[in-house]
Image: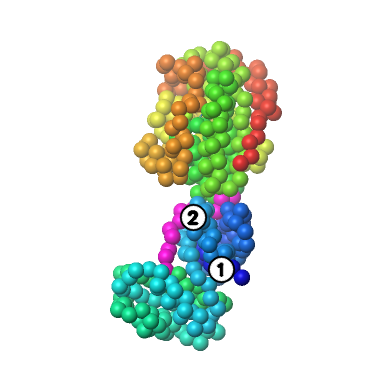
C-alpha cells in the first residue's frame, strides 16, 4: 500500500457559539471534501474535536495548501499516522525528529484513548527519552525549543511538529447565500471574500454594458470569480446585459444623478437574482466616501429600492487596507488589469454627492414606465457562467 499521511484539521470552538455545532462541523467536512475532490484516495472524517483527512503521503503538502483557503479551519498539521503501540510511536517520533535540524526539543503528548496504558505526561517523558537515546547531542527544553513534537494517541496515533495557521471564519454556506455585485475592480472581490469568511456562499452578478464595456472586461470578472471560488467553492456568475437600461438612464435622466440611478437599477436587478436563487442579502464593495455615490446619502438612495439587507464589509476601510487583502487573496493582479468596467460616457462630470431621495425619485421618473419590463428582460437574458 502507498504510504498514508493525515492532515489534522482544527476548527474554532468560539465561533461555534450560537450556531448548531453539528451543522457547522458537517458543513466543514463537506466543504473540505469538495476542496480536495480532485485528489485521489482522500477520506475525510470527524473525530472528537477535530477533522481528519487521510490521503497518500505525497499529496499531503498540496492538499494542506488548498485547505488554508477553507473557512472555518483555524489551523492544520500534516501528521504521520501509526498504530497506537509504543514501538510504532517511538519510530514515528524519531522519523519526525530526523526531518528537522534542531538542538533543543520537547515532546508533548495527548492521550485521547484511555485504553492506552500510559498517561499523557508519561508518554511525553518516555518519548523524550527515546529521542535523547537515539539522536545524540540533543537537549530537552520546555519553553521555546527549536522543535516541538506533538503526539496524539487516539484509536490510532498522530505525530507532527508543525502548525499551519489558516483563515478561521465560518464554513461557507453556514450563513446562507448572498448576491455579490462583482465588478472588475479591486473592491468587490474583497467584499465577497470577507462575507464568505462569515459563512455566506456568494452568487455573483456582473452588469455588462457591451459594447461600452468590452468582452475582455467580462473575461476579467470571470477570472476574478474563479479566484474567489478557490475560497468559496462553486460560484454561479450572472452576466446581466445592462446596455439598454444604462443608455436609457443616460439619455433620459438628469446628468448629475445618472450614477446613483444606475446603481439603483443594479440593486433592483440584484435583488431579483437574490429572490430567484434563495439569497438573503446583497453584497457590494462600497467604502464610505470613496466616490460620490458612496456617501451616506448615496447609500440611502440605493438602499431605498431594495428590502434585503445590503452588506458592505469594506464600508469603514481605506483603499490601502483593501488593496492589502486583495493582494493576500490573489485578486489584485487581475483587478488592476486595464479593461475598465465603466465607460466614461456613463460617468457624469459633476455627480451629485448628496442625492436627496425625493430628487432622485423625480429624476428617475422617466425610467419608471418601462422599468419593470426592462428589469425582467435583463434578468431573463442573463448569461449564467458556472465556475
Ligand atoms: P470596485 O473596485 O469593486 O469596482 P468601485 O470602487 O469601483 O468598486 P463603484 O464602481 O462605485 O466602486 O461600485 C461600487 C460597488 O458596486 C462595487 O464594489 C460593486 O459591488 C458594485 N458594482 C459596480 N459596478 C458593477 C458592475 N458593472 N457589475 C456588478 N457590480 C458592480
Ligand atoms: Mg468599479
Residue under pointer 1: 4
Q: Front-most of 207 and 355?
A: 207
Identify which residue is drawn at 59% across, 50% down.
173
Please tell me whether the stretch drawn in magenta is mainly helix, strand or loop.
loop
Q: Is residue 30 above or below residue 138?
A: above
Q: Secondary structure at mark 1?
A: strand
- Tell me residue 28's x, y (percent): 57, 57
Query: Which residue sits at x=67%, y=37%?
Result: 276
Q: Which residues are magenta?
A: 161-175
Position in image of residue 145 (x %, y %)? 32, 71
> Which quarter of the image is occupied by the C terminus?
top right
Local crowd at mark 2 within 10 Å, few (<14), some, or many (≥20)?
A: few
* Residue at the image position 39 percent from the left and 30 percent from the top: 289
Q: What is the x, y in percent for residue 365?
A: 58, 16
Q: Is residue 129 left or right of residue 79?
A: left
Is residue 109 shown left or right of residue 36? Answer: left
Residue 65: mark in rendering: 2
In the rendering, which numbered label is found on residue 349?
A: none
In what element is the residue under mark 2? Answer: helix
Asked whether mark 1 and ligand 1 are closer than 8 Å, the reply comes as no
Q: Nearer the viewer, residue 54 or 376?
A: 54
Q: Residues within 10 Å of mark 1 (few under 14, many from 20)?
A: some
Residue located at (65% from left, 42% from top): 278
In the image, farthest residue toward the top: 251
Question: Which one is in front in this view, the residue at disc 2 or the one at disc 1?
Answer: 1
Residue 178 visible in the displayed image:
no
Furthest residue in direction bottom, as rendered: 117
Q: Nearer the viewer, residue 9 or 127?
A: 127
Q: Is residue 315 magenta?
A: no
* Colouring style: rainbow
Amino acid at each position: 500500500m502507498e504510504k498514508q499521511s493525515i492532515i489534522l484539521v482544527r476548527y474554532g470552538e468560539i465561533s461555534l457559539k450560537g450556531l448548531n455545532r453539528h451543522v457547522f462541523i458537517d458543513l466543514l467536512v463537506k466543504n473540505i471534501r469538495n476542496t480536495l475532490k480532485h485528489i485521489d484516495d482522500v477520506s475525510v472524517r470527524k473525530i472528537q474535536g477535530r477533522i481528519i483527512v487521510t490521503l497518500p503521503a505525497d499529496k499531503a503538502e498540496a492538499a494542506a495548501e488548498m485547505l488554508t483557503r477553507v473557512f472555518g479551519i483555524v489551523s492544520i498539521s500534516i501528521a504521520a499516522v501509526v498504530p497506537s503501540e509504543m514501538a510504532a510511536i517511538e519510530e514515528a517520533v524519531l522519523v519526525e525528529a530526523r526531518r528537522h535540524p534542531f538542538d533543543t526539543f520537547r515532546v508533548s503528548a495527548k492521550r485521547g484513548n484511555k485504553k492506552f496504558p500510559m498517561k499523557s505526561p508519561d508518554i511525553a517523558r518516555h518519548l523524550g527519552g527515546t529521542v535523547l537515546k537515539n539522536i545524540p547531542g540533543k537537549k530537552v527544553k520546555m519553553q521555546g525549543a527549536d522543535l516541538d513534537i506533538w503526539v496524539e494517541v487516539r484509536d490510532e496515533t498522530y505525530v507532527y511538529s508543525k502548525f499551519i495557521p489558516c483563515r478561521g471564519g465560518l464554513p461557507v454556506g453556514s450563513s446562507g447565500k448572498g448576491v455579490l455585485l462583482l465588478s472588475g475592480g479591486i473592491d468587490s472581490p474583497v467584499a465577497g471574500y470577507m462575507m464568505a469568511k462569515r459563512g455566506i456562499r456568494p452568487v455573483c452578478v456582473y452588469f455588462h454594458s457591451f459594447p461600452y464595456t468590452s468582452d475582455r472586461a467580462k473575461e476579467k470578472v470571470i477570472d476574478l470569480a474563479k479566484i474567489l471560488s478557490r475560497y468559496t467553492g462553486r460560484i454561479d456568475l450572472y452576466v446581466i446585459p445592462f446596455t439598454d437600461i444604462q443608455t436609457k438612464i443616460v439619455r433620459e435622466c438628469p446628468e448629475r444623478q445618472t450614477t446613483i440611478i444606475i446603481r439603483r437599477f443594479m440593486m433592483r436587478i440584484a435583488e431579483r437574482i437574490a429572490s430567484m436563487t434563495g439569497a438573503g442579502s446583497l453584497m457590494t464593495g462600497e467604502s464610505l466616501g470613496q466616490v460620490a455615490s458612496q456617501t451616506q446619502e448615496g447609500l440611502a438612495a440605493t438602499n431605498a429600492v431594495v428590502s434585503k439587507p445590503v452588506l458592505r464589509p469594506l464600508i469603514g476601510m481605506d483603499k490601502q487596507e483593501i488593496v492589502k487583502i486583495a493582494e493576500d487573496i490573489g485578486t489584485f493582479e487581475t483587478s488592476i488589469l486595464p479593461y475598465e468596467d465603466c465607460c466614461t460616457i456613463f460617468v457624469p462630470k459633476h455627480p451629485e454627492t448628496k442625492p436627496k431621495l425625493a430628487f432622485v425619485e423625480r429624476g428617475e421618473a422617466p425610467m419608471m414606465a418601462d422599468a419593470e419590463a426592462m428589469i425582467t428582460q435583463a434578468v431573463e437574458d442573463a448569461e449564467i457562467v458556472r465556475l
